[in-house]
Image (tube, rainbow, N blue to C red):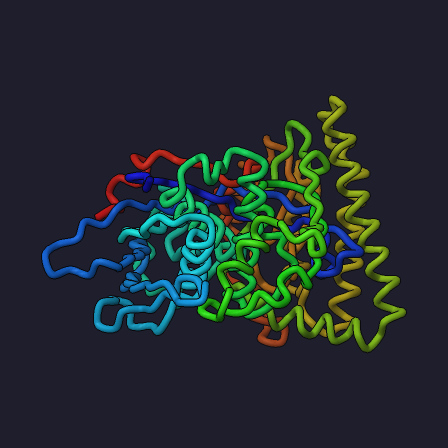
Amino acid sequence: MNQPTVAVSAPGKVLLAGGYLVLDRQYTGLVFGLDARIHVHIQKLPTSPGGLLSEIIVRSPQFLDAEWRYGYREIENCGGIQVSQLKGHTTSQYSRNKFVETALAYALSYISAVSKLKIGSVSITIIADTDYYSHPDPDNANSARFVNFNVPLTEAHKTGLGSSAALVTSFTAAVLSHYLDHRQLNLDSDFGRARLHNLAQAAHCAAQGKVGSGFDVAAAVYGSCVYRRFSPSILDGLGEVGSPDFSRRLGVVVEDSDPSVRWDMRIDKVAAVLPAGLRLVMCDVHCGSETVGLVKKVLAWRKEHPAEAALLWATLQKGGEDLAKELQRLAQTSTTSSYGFKDLSDIFLTIRSLVREMSGKANVPVESKVQTTLLNACCQISGVVGGVVPGAGGYDAIALLIEDEALPSLQAFLDSYTIASSNEDGPLVGKVRLLGVRQEMEGLRMEESTMFAGWML
């Protein structure tokens, strides 16, 4: 039986250690969830006389012209549910929202594989916490959880917090929770979370057009963890929506029912902790880069220099393990002085040195000159333990680990901070904004619909 309304949210992420390494199952990544969330609200869509009976409306009201209308139909020979954007019924002038469209098709196809219920028309609203996007007015950006960005979605500048993975995860969870009852899917159970994880990974990879590491989806489902990726071969042979037997194959993958092809990722939540008195914060430099281009260049260098890369990867892996172990050790002690964090600071410096070595060898700005300058300046502030350019690097937000009482000093410093850089150093960085986010241990969460008052139709 369809639930009348469902509201779900999933957190963003920051890969504090293990950038590039996490693409390989030999290595792990230390990923923290962030309390910046993508929220998805779903409700039944009343059909008016003459209206379409098989229509799904998706809105993102924080952006201009961000509404997509879809028709859907079941394909013969167990081909799943095919989703088609309705021409003339969509306000967006842009062709597709590939993440929404793919997540919708995969979720509905899975539902068709496990249930015979009729898929009714629904209205879906997507709301992003403010810090997912750079905002031209920092004062207003920090004053409300949700703001109107007043730009088309394609012109919004991301801060690199993992919006696509959080979107696909929360969107998939909302659709499943609306159409399936608790006997068919209970997202509060380990089995239910595992099925959501598997389906969101498959949909996210299909939307991206490649099989990524999956750490961002894992963080969206489970929250902070030490993550070892799944074998890409798990998704081999899944095929495309509409191909014969697609829904059956998708059901097997999601439910992990083929003993010869089992999901083999490792998600260790116990190993990802922060000591009391420390917080993880992010600084937005307002000129994010495309991860894909950086990754291709780094992996090309690794392929051309396998022995040199193997040594660097092994050293980076040790740095990440040392970071996780030191955080666990501190979490079990009562250290409150900055001197007690010296070993932690040294580990951050070691990791940064190795990342800059990677940058130089691969000739890509994993930690660019402007980021180095910013990180060095921030680390001079009393109470700032250390920091990194997280994940694949580039010009996204930087991550800092600070003592709680250092937050006002860091904010005051950044309020007056600018970077003078040449075009040779990369994009020019003007003001740097301290995002209003911190670490989040929890993953997917059910929400109250009332929190979206003013944003719903």
Nearest the camera: 340 or 50?
50
User: Would residue 226 be found to the left or right of residue 205 on screen?
Assistant: right
Q: Position of residue 421 (x, y in %)?
A: 59, 68
Q: Is residue 348 visible to the viewer in this orientation of the structure?
A: yes
In the image, residue 147 sits, relative to residue 329, either above or below, namely below
Which residue shows up at 81% across the image and 38% down it? 343
Q: Position of residue 10 (x, y in %)?
A: 48, 44
User: Would residue 309 be found to the left or right of residue 230 on screen?
Assistant: right
Tag count: 0
Residue 92, image quadrant: bottom left
Which residue shows up at 45% across the image and 35% down it? 183
Nearest the camera: 161 or 221?
221
Which residue shows up at 57% across the image and 55% down it? 201
In the image, residue 101 sits, relative to residue 38, either above or below, namely below
Location of the N terminus (image quadrant): top left
Q: Position of residue 246 (x, y in %)?
A: 50, 64
Nearest the camera: 208 or 80?
80
Q: Position of residue 98 (x, y in %)?
A: 43, 66
User: Would residue 93 be found to the left or right of residue 352 on screen?
Assistant: left
Q: Is residue 376 visible to the viewer in this orientation of the structure?
A: no
User: Would residue 170 be found to the left or right of residue 144 on screen?
Assistant: right
Nearest the camera: 69 or 134?
69
Q: Residue furthest left?
A: 49
